[in-house]
Each structure stands twice: as structure tokens, then as C-alpha cells.
Image: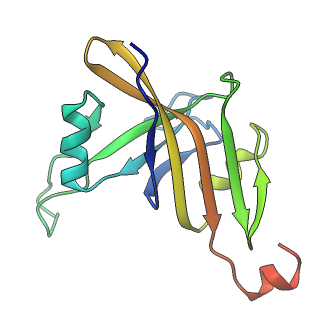
Amino acid sequence: MRRANLFLENVKIGFRNFEGREGQYNAEGKRNFVIFLDNETAARLEEQGWNIHWPKPTENDTENEKNPFLKVRVNFNWKGLKIVMIVNGKPEFLDEDTVGVLDTAELENVDVSISPYEYEPGKISASLASIYATVKTDEFMAKYGY
């Protein structure tokens, strides 16, 4: 059974590695990021089978909890992948050579479409289908045509 894409608007993303650089938790060439979720949304998605990560609280954590998240893979081998960065109202389509700019961009809004992959019965991982990321602009961006 083909599952429908998951659409999430105005999300906060983190642990961005659109470039695919090697790191402590990432093999070189593996592109990914996470979407931080509120507890209610995370619980609902987990019930549907999505692979939600629930970080363990630490002693230094003042609220005694951290946001759950959904890890999302970015795969340029998928033909339908669409990555759009919006700067000063102008959309720019990014490819595997330019997508790394999202790793450090200051984003004010992110909307995503996530494609589900059922790797075991009832267990779903997330792959990016599309992302629309609006970069926070300043007066110099407007002045210089960005």
C-alpha cells in the first residue's frame, strides 16, 4: 500500500547537513536534517508508524525534556525531489551542488513534503519530497538584488 506524503508547514529544522559532509553522526555523502516536533504531533506520527526520535532529558536540561524529531533523508537520485530557497520573495531551485547553502542560512519559514518509506511493516522512515525554505532577509539583500 502506497502511503500519502506528509505535509508540514512552518517547521523548525535542525542538524542540517544538506551538503552531505562527514561528521560524528554522519557518513560522508549522506544528506539529511531533522524536523523538530511538538509532543502531540510526534505522538500522532509515531502511532502512524513514523520513526520519531525522543531525546532523553539531561541533568542540565532546565525544562526536563527536549523536542522530539523526525530525521529526513535528502536523496538526489529521486527524480521528484524539489528544493526551493526563497530569498526576498524570489524562488531559487537548488541542486546537489548548491543545496549546501541551506546548512547555514538563517531561515524564517520552512514548509516540507515528506515521502514515506515503509522499511518494515508499520515502520516508516522519511525522505524529502520537497522543501520551500524562506531565508530571513535584511536591507542589504534587497539593496544588492537578493
Q: Position of residue 108 (x, y in %)?
A: 55, 70
* Picture layout, residue 80 above or below residue 105: above
Q: Which x, y percent locates residue 117?
A: 43, 21
Vertical side of 137 occupied by 122: above or below: above
Q: Residue furthest right?
A: 144
Residue in the image at 11% along x and 62% along y: 64
Image quadrant where one finds the N terminus: top left
Name the residue: 61% across, 58% down: 133
The one of 93 and 14 positioned closer to us in this rendering: 93
**Residue drawn at 15 percent across, 58 percent down:** 65
Residue 13 picture location, percent across and down = 46, 54
Residue 35 appears left or right of 55: right
Left or right of 64 on screen, residue 107: right
* Residue positioned 71% across, 46% down in the render: 99
Relative to 59, is 93 above or below? above
Q: Indicate how the structure is coloured in the image.
A: rainbow
Q: Position of residue 69 (x, y in %)?
A: 32, 46
Where 66 sits versus 5, above or below?
below
